[in-house]
Image (cartoon, rainbow, N blue to C red):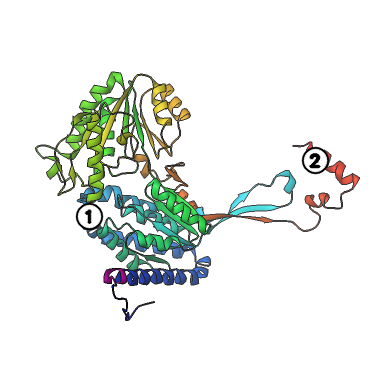
């Protein structure tokens, strides 16, 4: 529906509110029309060949290669993300997902035979993956290209149609995503809606077959509540405070380098970034000194300063800058010690990498996901203390352990819960596409990447074929006689 003219008769009307209402009505109607178009064409996807799905994935791959520079420019415009970092953390992830899907699709999509139990003798059973239908993907701003295009690859591989809602906080990348979709896919297969929270609200009211959301636990609850109204299935990739444990037996130089890169790449705005360190008292100070060395080495090499470094990203916007700055001020006010830090520039949304010790456990910094370049370092004297601290917090998306001790490693893995565990490194499990990626409870629901992404966007439909003639089940048909009761008594003794 479009509005050609409006008659204003109220004596004290607010023109801005009127125009806002008109715009919202138009957006709502356009979204509904797009959803209707997807629904009308859904039946054609049921008969689509795997080669057609692979054709779209290859077109997407070719588009990304041809427009790589435009993706670089958009990410830099949004938060000064270095081009090589865009390649490594955004483009590589999507291209590797495409490559795996194209090479594996026949295997993923084939029926899987299921053995029959004794009670089902004579039957033949299998599971058949089928597309869920119309899927909504709501992607975040911190990795705005990969966390939109990655789930899109899985959805297309599984045979779905998609409506994509990229983040309004990275408008340049969102515009590139919109152009990419328009140039690769027909509108009834994939469409994009840019805009703010009001667009997401309109979309979430529609009866999608599946919703894939990446973002914060707080918004994840909103998405799940909205999905419940239409009984839409969900995959939620959320966040949380991912702990990093460094025991006395760890290789401190290696631990420091790997923690430094995983934490401060993308300016700390990474859902699987180390959120805080729990380090054995015996190696606390050596770890801090090595962290300083490697933070400088990787993000301000040579005579370069952090604020002029071509390898150090920026906070995405003023709102998030203010939140992180306030967390830092509050923690320092409460008695934390600044071990490493420097200038902060609100105009350019620059925050120098920060290391803190003596952080109060009840500080906001230890309650909220930091999602910025601040790293608390907390010492411990006993591994049971580590487990107690971790278990007092909501389940994290990832847990990192740096140790040479198999005993400590087994104990931590067994006595804590998290979406994933990575030993002697941080965040790299995200790139292992043969592993499921996802959280648990507060950090997410469901899994993605590779085959697990294909499954997330599929319904694994069970199919059973019964043989003709007499079947084992018929022995227990009513009416129930003495013979049937004796047969049931005998049968139950087998179990």
Q: How crowded is mark 1: few (under 14 residues within 10 Å), some or many (20 or more)?
A: many
Residue 285, magenta (yes or no): no
Element assignment for label 2: helix
Q: Which residue is drawn at 33% across and 29% down?
A: 361
**Residue 264 seen:** no
Relative image position of residue 84 (x, y in whole percent): 22, 48
> Taking 27 as reference, is 467 left or right?
right
Q: Residue furthest right?
A: 482
Question: Mark 2–mark 1 contact, CB under 8 Å?
Answer: no
In depth, the one of 189 and 349 nearer the eye is 349
Residue at the spot of label 1: 78
Residue at the spot of label 2: 491
> Taking 339 as reference, is 283 left or right?
right
Q: Which residue lies furthest to the left in this view?
A: 303
Q: For the C terminus, which image quadrant?
A: top right
Q: Which residue is drawn at 24% across and 54% down?
A: 75
Q: Which residue lies furthest to the front in this view?
A: 11
Relative image position of residue 191 (x, y in whole percent): 38, 66
Relative image position of residue 435 (x, y in whole percent): 43, 43
Residue 16, magenta (yes or no): yes
Magenta part of the protein: which range? 13-18
Q: For the N terminus, which image quadrant?
A: bottom left
Sequence-wise, the earlier of marks 2 and 1 is 1
Report the label total. 2
Q: Which residue is drawn at 26% across and 44% down?
A: 323
- On residue 225, the disc is none
Rounded to the nearest angstrom, the CA distance separating label 2 from label 1 is: 68 Å
Tell me which corner region of the image, top left, top right, bottom left or bottom right, holds residue 295: top left
Relative image position of residue 228 (x, y in whole percent): 51, 55
Q: In this view, does 354 lie above or below 483?
A: above
């Amino acid at each position: 529906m479009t509005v050609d003219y409006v008659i204003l008769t109220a004596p004290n009307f607010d023109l801005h509110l009127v125009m806002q209402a008109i715009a919202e009505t138009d957006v709502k109607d356009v979204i509904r029309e797009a959803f209707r178009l997807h629904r009308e064409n859904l039946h054609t996807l049921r008969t689509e060949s795997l080669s057609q799905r692979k054709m779209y994935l290859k077109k997407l791959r070719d588009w990304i290669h041809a427009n790589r520079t435009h993706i670089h420019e958009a990410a830099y415009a949004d938060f000064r993300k270095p081009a090589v970092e865009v390649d490594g953390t955004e483009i590589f992830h999507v291209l590797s997902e495409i490559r795996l899907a194209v090479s594996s699709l026949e295997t993923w999509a084939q029926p899987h035979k299921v053995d029959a139990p004794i009670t089902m003798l004579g039957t033949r059973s299998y599971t058949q993956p089928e597309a869920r239908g119309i899927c909504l993907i709501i992607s975040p701003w911190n990795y705005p290209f990969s966390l939109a295009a990655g789930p899109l690859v899985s959805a297309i591989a599984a045979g779905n149609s998609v409506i994509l809602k990229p983040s309004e906080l990275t408008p340049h990348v969102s515009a590139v995503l919109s152009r990419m979709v328009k140039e690769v896919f027909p509108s009834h297969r994939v469409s994009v809606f840019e805009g703010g929270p009001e667009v997401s609200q309109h979309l979430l009211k529609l009866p999608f077959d599946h919703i894939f959301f990446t973002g914060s636990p707080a918004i994840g609850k909103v998405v799940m509540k909205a999905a419940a109204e239409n009984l839409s299935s969900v995959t939620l990739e959320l966040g949380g405070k991912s702990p990093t444990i460094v025991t006395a037996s760890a290789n401190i130089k290696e631990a420091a380098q790997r923690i430094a890169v995983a934490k401060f790449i993308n300016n700390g705005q990474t859902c699987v970034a180390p959120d805080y360190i729990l380090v054995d008292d015996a190696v606390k100070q050596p770890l801090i000194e090595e962290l300083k060395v490697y933070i400088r080495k990787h993000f301000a090499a040579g005579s370069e300063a952090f604020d002029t470094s071509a390898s150090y990203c920026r906070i995405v916007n003023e709102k998030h800058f203010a939140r992180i700055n306030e967390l830092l001020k509050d923690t320092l006010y409460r008695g934390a010690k600044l071990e490493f830090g420097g200038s902060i520039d609100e105009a350019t949304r620059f925050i120098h990498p920060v290391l803190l010790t003596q952080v109060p456990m009840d500080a906001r910094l230890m309650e909220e996901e930091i999602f910025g370049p601040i790293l608390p370092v907390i010492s411990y004297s006993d591994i049971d203390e580590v487990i107690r601290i971790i278990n007092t917090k909501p389940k994290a998306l990832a847990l990192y352990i740096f140790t040479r001790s198999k005993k400590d490693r087994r104990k931590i893995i067994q006595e804590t819960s998290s979406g994933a565990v990575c030993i002697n490194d941080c965040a790299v499990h995200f790139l292992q596409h043969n592993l499921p990626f996802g959280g648990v409870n507060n950090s997410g629901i469901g899994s993605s990447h590779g085959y697990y992404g294909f499954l997330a966007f599929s319904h694994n439909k069970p199919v059973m074929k019964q043989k003709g003639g007499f079947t084992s089940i018929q022995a227990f048909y009513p009416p129930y006689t003495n013979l049937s009761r004796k047969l049931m008594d005998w049968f139950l003794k087998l179990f």
